[in-house]
Amino acid sequence: MGKKSRNPLKYKAAALIAALAVAGSCLTGCATWDNFVAGLKGEKVLEQEAAEVVRIGVFEPMTGTDKKGAAAEIRGIELAHDLYPEVLGKPVELVYGDNQSDMNKAEAVAQELVNSKVSVVLGSYTNTLSLLGSNVFGEAKIPAVGITCTNPILTKSNPYYARVCFIDASQGNAAAKYAFEFLKQNKAIVLLEKDNDYAMAMATQFTQELMSLVENSYGGQVEITPTSVVYTAEYEKGTTDFTEQKEAIQKATTDMKVVFLPADAQTAIAAMESLADLDLIFVGTNQWETEEFLGSDSKVVKDARFTTVYDSHSDLTGMNTVFLEAYREKYGEDAVPSNEEALGFDAYRLALEAIAQAGDAQNGDLIMEKMTSIESFEGVTGTITLNAHGDPIKPVIIVRAKEGQMEPEYTAAPVWDE
């Protein structure tokens, strides 16, 4: 048989690389040269490098309008990386993708992380940016872990997305348990903004859970309807005067003391002021965990209750002690970690746990399978069990606002349908 024909393109490429290597010292921009060489490495070289380390993608808005919240998530990720820098006997490398808080750039940045051969992606801050990246990660079969994004669509629409924070509806579940089990109330008022999907999801969950708790207390012998346990008073978006709702509540009921109010801090303050003389107990969501709310001069606000994903005084698993010691060593003894930092820490560790259980950092299907079967994972924010959708079944803490501070008062473990 004759000799194999030579591939002219192959040898021309080799000659070009050799010539450019000689001329490399003449190039004025080292970055330009490095980028050129990186581009010539090819898919096989990237795969070889990825086999030597485990790459975790950090998909976050490091610049732009959302950078502050993202920076907190990243601090939590990096602190966990400091403590746990290896998995499967290999070093873990964090690969950053700045989506710039820009919906028009998020997908391209997500694709860059995919091209970098990451095993798992963490982020992004904000539901919208996470959903945009979700399409790219799902097509590439790369598991992703949301940190503070609470929109249920994220995990329901992509089987490769999980999260460490609770979903919106679970706050309603926890608020109902708090009202019934801690406050000993079997009826409640719901103040609900019209045409607000966020508020409706939590109000629905609150009502259903309270109905279930009341029905169970009667041994299932009494038929419970939504109107028998909840009086709903609706208001329009932007309402600042709740006199109309106050009058409706006074006419409708005199024995309901708890008000569930899934609204932002500004709306909540206005509602509490309008209803201040009715001697009600207001229960809200993590939207109240703001400087505006906690710093309010209102006496009613100072005694409000709301859900939170993390409280530094509540060590639910023992992991919080490890986290706090590392956090204060890095940021100072008086430093107080945020929800985002605690969740970022949990997200990184959860990703490593899934990779370790899979025993293979490159098999996205197996990593995701292991991730959604994780049970009783000891996180900083509580014990985490992921359901089939990748949503966590975990504790939700109810805190009480007192003089600008938050004091933990009750812990609820929500459960929802698979």
Image (cartoon, rainbow, N blue to C red):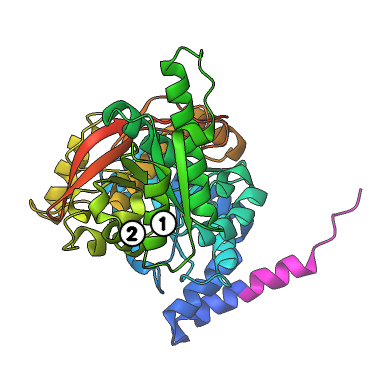
Q: Report if residue 2 lies within the magenta region.
A: yes
Q: Nearer the viewer, residue 77 or 87?
A: 77
**What's the residue type where badge 1 is placed?**
Gln
Q: Mark 1–mark 2 contact, CB under 8 Å?
A: yes
- For residue 4, side relative to residue 174 (left or right): right
Tag of residue 38: none
Label 1 and label 2: CA atoms lie apart by 9 Å
Residue 359 showing in the rendered view: no
Residue extending furthest toward the left: 333
Question: What stretch of residues is rendered in magenta?
Answer: 1-16
In the rendered image of this protein, does residue 279 appear above or below residue 70?
A: above
Mark 1 and mark 2 lie on one chain; the one further toward the N terminus is 1
Which residue carries the number 2 mark?
271
In which quadrant is the C terminus drawn? top right
From this view, report whether residue 162 is shown above or below residue 372.
Answer: below
Q: Could you tell me residue 171's position as x and y percent?
A: 41, 41
Q: Nearer the viewer, mark 1 or mark 2?
A: 1
